Amino acid sequence: MNYFDEYDVFSTLVITAHPFYNIHMETLAKLAATSQNMFLEPDAEHECQPQIGGVLAETRIPIAEVVKSGGGRMKVLKTMLTTACERDCHYCPFRAGRHTRRATFKPDELAGIFTQVHRAGAVEGLFLSSGIIKGGVTTQDKLLDTAEILRKKRGFRGYLHLKVMPGLEKDQLLRAMQLASRVSINLEAPNAGRLAALAPKKRFDAELLAPLVWAHQIRRTLDPRQTWNGRWASTVTQFVVGAVGETDLELVSVSERLYKQLGLARAYYSAFHPIADTPFEDLPAEDEARKVRLYQTSFLLRDYGFSMEELPFEPDGSLPRHTDPKTAWARQHLAAAPIELNRASREELLRVPGIGLKGADRILHARRQRRLHDLSQLSKLGIRAARAADFVLLDGRRPARQPALF
């Protein structure tokens, strides 16, 4: 199964609608408390805040519906071992000293409740994080203990996403990659200077970047047959966008290096939203449109063969907000030199707005059967023909377009 998820859609699991009656209501209340802010931990490009509510007799747990790249959805429980934390990251709802309810699970307790929820058919996978207590090594041990119980004692063979704690040891990362489907190592900021303003007690190189390097070394040098499914867990990272003045250029540059040099599966971008009783509570929320442009640009680098030098950054390091980066590039390079779709390579097809990865493959297959000569053929192939029309030739001619009524 491909776990390179496309996006999350949060729904709310009403516990009384499922056969979980042997789970103590106090335990369910803790699960709700450890899960309610997990929309801040994206497992995919887009996520919406879950609606949490209800009384104790009808405990509501947010469930992420992960839409997979191959199609279909997978329901994932996103939760934490503890919402207590000794770090004081300036944007975080779990930061030390903040007045909020704290809840903690023991590894066997959380493994047990997840197993019951999973067996009842409410979820297929687990995203497990934690606040940091007694250091990253101790906290990582508890996460690994939970994963060991699920894989070895409970026989769980589904999707397991484990967070990597700052300051863990290399052997702990190895074990996490043996047990998990995916591991998260969140850089949070594009460099040490930005991180100091965002999370002053975290060390960019030693605590956050180093595990990404270790993960790449593990995949390159060790036998994946020692893992739970014969494949190394993929690695992803996350950036908090808009809290400390970082530019789009900074974020995209480090994302590109991680893709090319360390085999990163995906960079996630979480638009900053202020949270009460944190040092950043008075800062404005970041525009969600900025996050969308960052994802679009990130995918051009990762999947579409673009380089940093080709991207349409503004002089101040920001991406254009009025149009997507692929269209901005095409207007500069293809408007006067359109691509002939009957002869273009896959790499050239991927440069055309409206043509995605699957669309390019469909065009290559279709033109082996017949020549393409009008936009209706492209539409039947699932191509967004109207977006592509200004940048392509069909049989040597620009395609005819239906004139607008007004």
Image (cartoon, rainbow, N blue to C red):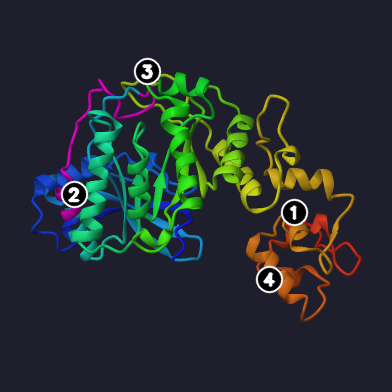
Q: Nearer the viewer, mark 1 or mark 3?
A: 1
Say if residue 80 shows up in the picture. Answer: no
Badge 3 or badge 4: first in the primary sequence = 3
Is residue 109 magenta-colored? yes
Query: Secondary structure under badge 4?
Result: helix
Query: Secondary structure under badge 2?
Result: helix
Badge 1 or badge 2: first in the primary sequence = 2
Question: Could you tell me what secondary structure mostly forms the magenta stretch?
Answer: loop
What residue is disc 3 on? Answer: 279
Is the residue marked by circle 4 packed among few (<14), some (14-19), or many (20+) residues within 10 Å?
A: some
CA distance for labels 2 and 4 = 45 Å
Instruction: Please identify the residue farthest to the bottom as the structure is shown.
Output: 369
Three-letter amino acid code at the position of disc 2: Leu
Residue 275 quadrant: top left
Is the residue marked by circle 3 packed among few (<14), some (14-19), or many (20+) residues within 10 Å?
A: some
Is residue 367 magenta-colored? no
Label disc, if present, on residue 351 of the rendered structure: 1
What residue is disc 2 on? Answer: 110
CA distance for labels 1 and 3 = 43 Å
Three-letter amino acid code at the position of disc 3: Pro
Q: Do callouts 2 and 3 mark residues in contact (Cβ within 8 Å)?
A: no
Label disc, if present, on residue 362 of the rendered structure: 4
Residue 298 quadrant: top right
Badge 2 or badge 3: first in the primary sequence = 2
Badge 1 or badge 4: first in the primary sequence = 1
Three-letter amino acid code at the position of disc 1: Arg
Q: Do callouts 1 and 4 mark residues in contact (Cβ within 8 Å)?
A: no
Which residues fall within the magenta stretch?
89-112
CA distance for labels 1 and 4 = 15 Å
Residue at the location (18% across, 36% down)? 103
